[in-house]
Image: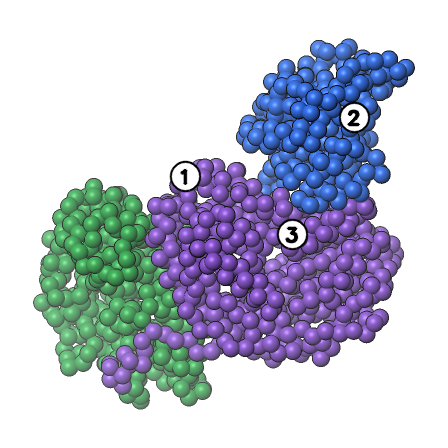
Chain colours: A green, B purple, C blue
Amino acid sequence: MSKVSSTTSSSVARGGAYVTLAPRNEVLEVESEAQLRTLLSSLSGVDAVGLEARVAKLSTRSLKQSTKLTALDLAISMVDLTTLEGADTPGRVRSLCHKARRPDPHDAAVPNVAAVCVYPDLVSVARDALAGSRVAVASVATAFPSGRASLAVKLADVREALAAGADEIDMVIDRGAFLAGRLGRVFEEIVAVKAECGAARLKVILETGELVTYDNVRRASWLAMLAGADFIKTSTGKVGVNATLPFALVMLEAVRDFAEVAGRPVGVKVAGGVRNAKDALRYLVVVNETVGARWLSADYFRVGASSLLNDLLMQRYKQRRGVYPRSDEFSGD
Amino acid sequence: MSDDQLQSRLGALIYDAAPESTASVQLRSHYGLYVDGVFRDGAENQHFVTINPATEETLASVTQASAHDVDLAVRAARRAYDDVWSTMPGAERAKYLFRVARLIQERARELAVVETLDNGKPIRESRDVDIPLAAAHFFYYAGWADKLDFAGFGPAPKPLGVAGQIIPWNFPLMMAAWKLAPALAAGNTCVLKPAETTPLTALLLAEIFEQAELPAGVVNILTGDGSVGAAIVDHPGIDKIAFTGSTEVGRQIQRHVAGSSKHLTLELGGKGANIVFDDAPLDEVVEGIIDGIFFNQGHVCCAGSRLLVQETIEDELLRRLTRRVEQLRVGDPLDKNTDVGAINSAAQLARVEEITASGELEGATRFSSSCPLPEKGFWFAPTIFSNVSQSQRVAREEIFGPVLSVLNFRTPDEAVAKANNTTYGLACGVWSEKGSRTMWVAERLRAGVVWANTYNRFDPASPFGGVRQSGFGREGGRQGLEAYLDV
Amino acid sequence: MNGAFVRSESGRSYEIVDASGTFVANVARASRKDVRDAVVAARAAQAKWWAATAYNRGQVLYRLAEMAESRRDELRDHVALAEASEAVAAVARAIDRVVWYAGWTDKIAQVYGSTNPVAGPFFNFSHPTPSGVVAVLAHPTSFEGLIDQVMAPLAAGNTVVVVASERHPTPAVLLGELSVTADFPPGVLNVLTGSLDELAPVVCAHEDVDGVDLSGVDDALLGELRSLSAESIKRVVRAGFASDADSLRRLRTFIETTTVWHTVGQ
């Protein structure tokens, strides 16, 4: 099926049970669906109550003063500023890109966001609007958000986005296939999309709200990483349950364990439902205490959001000046 | 700001100090005894100070009760029992207890801060565990006061009379609630002695009783050293002794009441085993082990102080565990981000240090967190002993500190045999994703509490207490009423 | 002891006489080592007795009642040594008591157990478990009393070491015999005869005995025996013989409450 960087398959058992802290960049061959299934079912289970209790405890962390300022800037730098609506227009995308380059026109110290995320047909608009900036263009592809299309259509979708200048592709997995146990199909689709991506960064959307259980999310995370994902991403933002702290924790544990086994850090992106600074800082705390410093950068952690950015800016303003800004201080883009 | 600047400033997120405000707290410089509804000085006018174990600073001066004060308190309790409390309809007793529960909730912030100052435990724990559970306990037992007929002990069960209650320093307010709430609900009156090093929240609770207009003498609170406890145990006017503390003192108390008709319940020491099978949810296991032994600095009678891990995953679990222990934030208990606080007293620190030294001498492998420790106060870095054999002291004796001993097993039978290989029997943990095996193990563990895929959980509706030399009697639940009824 | 009838390891015995002084029997005079052996037998049998289903324990106790019924006359003659003209009624009441306890074995968990509505995502239940090995210092004269003392801990899944009435030990010995024919597993019920002054302190001080029923002991001995029992934090009961409430107090003394928490999640 595919070669990924790892130790032997048995060494991945129980989330990297037999490896030392030092990564070993060995090669794991996923040879068959049966082998993949064995590997994923050997991962340690997740106790929902314990997981949620851990998150609840981490949510009591109190970030004050310089820590809070640092974290707010960090969060801004990790935002994938997103618009994924049927009503999106070139004008709408351009104003979003403007905001992405300079989130606060009055304060040059505010970092730019990580990326702007749009549908494939608007990639070229975003590409032009972001020319000369450090902001990446990300595009959802592969029949987003449902993924209900043939592989040929999905690959065409990806090619189109890349041709228009996308730096990053946010693909969706086939949740139906995953839930039906057709793991090989899910795996092969990711491998195919990854091959299509070439140097572009591939984010694989698990749609955790449809996978429902933490065990499923852990297995899907490993599956995506083994298939070559550069990022694993929680959600499309288009279903009832989007990113949650417990889902993020499961995925962060998976990338931590995968990095130990495979020697390759995979990023995590949370998307949907992260609306205010308080929520965003809670995610950063979970990142900080689960995978540590290396993941505290836009290279390895992203937050897909639209309204979040203004709240981050407002909290930043308040933290620096001691007062809250006017409600129209920051643009509505 | 350039990316490089941002990157270098960021690194790992270092948390700035986030101390809980002490503005809600106005400690008096001196506290008297709470007897017959008033605060009064002791008959012999002796005092001692209670200190903050995290800083060694004095918090307040507290009265050392004498035998005479014990006598006054018991007489007051007897009068209150005869004249007011035992004859009051249960529904009326309930109202007082509900009111106390509410007042604890209203003063929760203040109580949490004082608990942390006096005990050394992290504010996160006093705020999220101790104080809410204390209120919940009063709330739960309030509801029983007028329903005793339906508690399963026959119609119209009678209270015992005057209860003498002696509590430890590890959960000062929570233990007071565990003792007082069921006793009062059942119609007893009480003489409570908080621990010498942690008297303050019990005295604040006395203020709450005043606020709730609890009739005089229904609860009396005597502060002091072990001599006060001994005087309570020996007082002929006491009908019931309830004690939480060490097995050694429990044994002495049981001997002392042997010649009398006093009723007795004991909640004593433990050496809890946390059993981890190789199919357990490993990430949650790690957190459960941490909660099991480092919650409240390991000053927990039911602490999971022995980790029994299936040999197949021992190395992997130890690796994850030590990595996690390195992350624990040890320090200022008032800081909201502190995970592990101060050891409660110099004496307890000395005991933990002594037995830890024995672990090294006996050949166990020691790992201690490299966390920095404050210079003032009593501190001990979270510690794990591996390569421990069952005969070593660190595997047999209750350490009552942040020290974990790791042993392994090969089969479920062996796990159960090792878990039960102790004279104690308070609590155990079982970790597995296989329900049938968890139940199989739970049936065979000689312990009063079994936590499956969790550890150190408490609830007023859940009976708590030990078997064998961890004591007898239960606190919590319907079963907890039995300790205060003549049935 | 352990399902067999053995002489005292000390080889000692003493004579039992009736009210008129006529010789009735020689019985073994147990020693400290016999106590040790009886406790070992009881400890070894306990896990299995508890592992049997409550239904099965009830059947075994009921079978004991049937055996007693079939040897009612013999029992009456032995009970009469202490209880004279009351013996017929005493035996009848005692057998009824065995039946009463036989019916308790599979009710205890339902009456004394509970599921507990804790404030969190946990399934939490409390179930009664036996204390372990219980020593019974038998009522000196009442057969019904002896039966109540023995049946309460047995019904709850404990195993028992009885120190029989010193003056009137033969009903207890006969009870031991009946238990073997009633298919009690060896070691579940062990009966020692001998000097109470000699055996009681040994039993109470024995660290592998988890509980002791002192209901048959004079007030004079009580303080010392309780004090000895404190060394290993024994459960101690001294209850009357007048009512069901007394019996239930006995029963409750030798059950522990074990509370199990299990997480509940998808």
Q: What residue type is disc 3 on? A: Thr
Labels 3 and 1 positioned on one and the same chain: yes
Q: Which residue is mark 2?
A: C165
Dot 2: what SS?
Answer: loop
For the residues marked 3 and 1, what is the alpha-carbon distance in whole angstroms?
A: 31 Å
Q: Is residue C261 visible?
A: no
Q: In the displayed structure, does residue B25 sit left or right of residue A51?
A: right
Frontmost residue, B25 versus C50 = C50
Dot 3: what SS?
Answer: helix
Q: Residue at x 35, y 52 (%)?
A: B315
Answer whether labels 3 and 1 touch (C-beta < 8 Å): no
Would you place residue B418 above or below residue B192 in this image? above
For the residues marked 2 and 3, what is the alpha-carbon distance in whole angstroms?
A: 33 Å
Q: Residue at x 45, y 69 (%)?
A: B329
Q: Which residue is mark 3?
A: B247
Instruction: Give the mark count.
Output: 3
